[in-house]
Amino acid sequence: MSGLLLLLLLFLGSGAAELAAPQNVTMVTLNTNYMLSWDWDRSAAGSHGVTFTTQYVGKFKLRYKSPKWSMVCENTPQTSCDLTDLNLHYLGIYVFRVRASADGRHSDWVLKEFCPDKDAAVGPPSKVELSVAEGFLEISISDPLTNTNTSMKDKLRELYYHIVYWEGSPGIQASAQTLDSKKTLVTLSNLKSWTWYCVMVQSRSDFYNKTSSFTSPQCMQTTGAVQWWQIFLYFMGSLLLCFTFVLLALLCFFGLYKTVKKNFFPQMPPQFKEYFCDSPSSDIPRLLNTDSESELLCDKVIICPAPVLEIHNPPLEVLQASMSSLEPDSSGRHSRQDSSCSGDSGVYSAGGSSGLQQPNSAQSSTGIEASWRDPFDMDHVKMKDMAPGLKSQLLMADESIVDVCV
């Protein structure tokens, strides 16, 4: 009797010393991303640290007596284990097990069976884009992606999209309409022009009744024929914009002009304008003002070019006629010359001449003709136009010459 009691106490003591096994072992999945998660009461281990170990094996290998388990996570303090890097076959069936360890003690293994094709959840489309045409709305859908950025349609052949669209804002879905399509480019027709429509898309697979969450609502306004009032509003808006731009440009220009004028072209102080300018509002000095009366007191001065006196060579007949007219008066002139110059005979002797003697007619005619011919043999002689009074001019010149020679 005492032996049986001792064995019972040993069994109870050994049971109390064992660790509690993990609880609520679940598989968190999305497309081909897998995570094994569990719960465990850390207060049961006391002050000792607890770690967890996770292993897996193909279900068909469990038929063997000693199946070989593959290690995934070993002695990790976390209550989860990432299985994504295992690249499990999507149609395969696997068995996972996990246990707790603390201070050399181990809990029991907890098993979890997992088939990706049946148990893995499918995610929503990776991207949804809207484009608008006249009366149409096009929806571009991108397939859900695996952990290697490939399409999930490679895993789920029957994957399609459930589209929900409605008129109005994102929060109003009273008149929502649905559409299913396997295509990634869907066109919504028979829509109202110039109306806002919102769209949400969901991924689905009916074989294992898989459905994803909806994408965020995206809204866009349809187009149509442009109304005349819209054209008028666009025109008036553009006109107002141009007018505002021009007005601002002018204001900036005048502001800059005043600044430059004030800094680089200072005005005359008012106390000086009173004395130097015609009016206080004028910046032009009184002496430089073109409208002042001081300019009216000045006489105009006209500068003319100096005239040029040209003397042409007279004809020989004119000279002979003038010389013939001089012969009768030669005696009278020479007589007057002799009478007036009788007292000054020494002057002629000093000049190296024998005095003035009256030449005979032949000599006088020949000498005068020679004396008048030589000067006028030049090609050009500057002289006033020969006028009918040339005879009187030559006589006056002759008399002046005689008087000077005395």
Image (cartoon, helix red, strand yellow):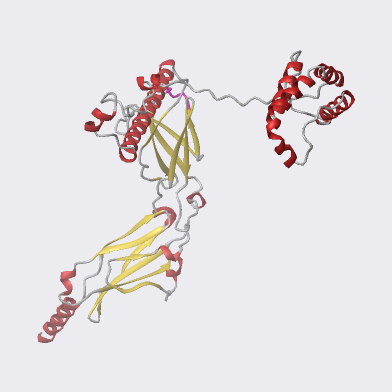
Instruction: Identify the residue at horizontal 39%, vertical 19% (top origin).
Output: 296
Residue 107: quadrant of the picture: bottom left
- Specify the principal SS of the magenta part: loop
Residue 64 at x, y percent in the picture? 44, 73
Instruction: Identify the residue at horizontal 40%, vertical 16% (top origin).
Output: 229
The range drawn in magenta is 189-193
Closest to the observer, 175 or 122 = 175
Q: Is residue 206 left or right of residue 278?
A: right
Residue that sits furthest to the bottom in the current view = 3
Looking at the image, residue 97 lies above or below residue 213: below
Q: Is residue 396 left or right of residue 189?
A: right
Closest to the observer, 144 or 89 = 144
Residue 327 at x, y percent in the picture? 82, 19
Residue 291: quadrant of the picture: top left
Closest to the observer, 351 or 398 = 351
On whether residue 192 falls in the magenta region, the answer is yes
Quarter of the picture holding the C terminus: top right
Quarter of the picture holding the N terminus: bottom left
Residue 405 at x, y percent in the picture? 71, 32
